[in-house]
Amino acid sequence: MNDIPGDLKFLSSHEWVRVEPDGSVTIGISDHAQDLLGDIVFVELPDIGQSIDAETDAAIVESVKAASDVYSPISGEVTEVNSILEDQPEIINSSPYEDGWFFKMAPSDLGEIEDLLSPEDYSEVCED
Amino acid sequence: MIQPKNTVLHSSHIDLGAKMVNFAQWEMPITYSSLMEEHHAVRKTAGIFDVSHMAVFDFNGGDQIGFFEKIFANDIKKIANENKALYGVLLNEDGGILDDLIIYHANNRFRLVSNCSTREQNFDWYKKHAVDFGVEVVERKDMGILAIQGPAAMKKILAMNEISPLVENLEPFGCMFAGEHLYARTGYTGEDGLELIVTNDVIVSLWEKALAKGCTPIGLGARDTLRLEAGLNLYGNDMTINNHPYESNLAWTIDMKDEARNFIGKNALLKVDREVSQKIIGVLLKDRGVLRPGYEIIHEQGKGIILSGTYSPTLEASIGLARVDQGHGDKGQVMIRNKALNIEFVSPRFLRQGKM
């Protein structure tokens, strides 16, 4: 788990959030999560404009083996979704932290970020 | 917690970097590399599976034909004078499916392979009924099973000196003994290939030889997508003790031609009204999503439920097996997370359609 980018914060359920320079946030699932799921074949993304509370389900990701809910690490309103994933969900396997992002939000309280796991804390979760 | 059981290839799987899972109390590989790559390897070249968790039984003495005529819903006489394998089900008196299994006959010997989760139940059942026929039932814990499957499987097998070149002459479902080893042209993928039911002492070397010849190791994940594309039922999933064969797409395995033969479950099956009983059918999802077990189905004349569902790597769409009320047309709907999505009812043999 040495390849966790340092600018991310995590939920123990394997979602990451990145604060962008413009104050928006980007959300995706971790490398560990994509590895656990295996070949990803389907995603269901939230609607643009949808309000999502922290730690509630925001998207669905399905591999050949299983379906899994994706929780939003923080609260906010969805501003953009990575719709390329609908045709090419396998991008999540190959690039979970970059091209495989799920959606962007305007956060309602950036302070929520402080409650999330640092990369170091998250990597300990993965080792358990 | 019960300590999981290991096959003799356990450390070989770990060395290959397999992800291991607990499957019916056996620790088995689910994937080695990627499920998708393993699936395509079997469809395009050849893959090797460790299926040593399955149960192998041999039989000694007595009236073995009489014994199988009684416990097996298919008619053993079909293979009693041939070197062949016969698929069928074991029923209880109510016509409920206790298990599905394959009985092999070659060189005047029978051997039986059934599922791992039903091992103890079946062993007790065989012993209970074998007594009347003077047959001794032997569980071959000293044996394991390798399956080598795919369009190039026979070529790879014939390049292995350890296996008799005579296997080339086996017809589909044909089998032969070489000492205690049984080679059969059977499988669970819809592809050509062999199942090798051999003593544990040769398993590791056969496995390594097959890998050296270019067979890809295949985990239980791809085993499931491969069998579902081939439209083959999985016991415990698509049928249980609460289902009879007619509602499980297995009418073709019930043989009542010999009217004098009274197999266990026959009387119950004769009472089933096949005009109204449910049936298993193939389902193709027309909208985006993935079919999963338990999803509810609706069609013009009734309802149903998904039994097995997955993403088909070959068809690049989601497929499933469903048990539905009769009277459906070509189209229906499946409920996924409170949304009604469109499905098409098709033959369970998805693979054949994919190749059309």
Image (spheres, coloured by chain):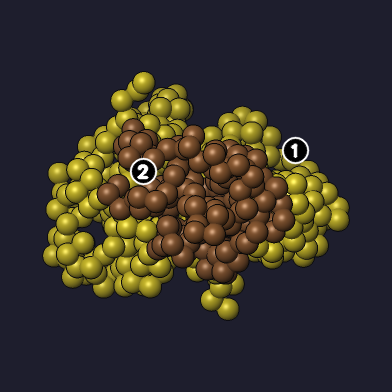
Chain colours: A brown, B yellow
Tell me the quarter of the picture where residue A54 sits.
top right
Q: Are marks 1 and 2 in contact (CB under 8 Å)?
A: no
Image location (x, y in percent) of residue A67: 55, 48
Identity of the residue furthest to the right in this view: B300
Could you tell me which chain the residue with mark 1 belongs to? B
Q: Nearer the viewer, residue B312 or A9?
A: A9
Q: Is residue B132 visible?
A: no
Q: Is residue B338 visible?
A: yes
Residue drawn at (36%, 67%) of the image: B41
* Residue at image mark 1: B271
* Left or right placement of residue A98 versus residue B228 in this view: left
The N terminus of chain B - image quarter: top left
Image location (x, y in percent) of residue B69: 50, 41
Mark 2 secondary-structure assignment: helix
Q: Nearer the viewer, residue B331 or B232?
A: B331
Q: Are marks 1 and 2 on the same chain?
A: no
Residue drawn at (68%, 34%) of the image: B268
Q: Which mark is residue A119?
A: 2
Q: Nearer the viewer, residue A93 or B89?
A: A93
Badge 1: how crowded within 10 Å, few (<14), some, or many (20+)? few
Residue drawn at (26%, 73%) of the image: B155
Could you tell me which chain the residue with mark 2 belongs to? A
Badge 2: how crowded within 10 Å, few (<14), some, or many (20+)? many
Q: CA distance from mark 1 to mark 2?
A: 64 Å
Above or below, B40 against B234 in this view is below
Above or below, B23 against A95 in this view is above
Image location (x, y in percent) of residue B215: 26, 64
Q: Nearer the viewer, mark 1 or mark 2?
A: 2
Above or below, B251 against B28 in this view is below
Tell me the quarter of the picture where residue A9 sits.
top left
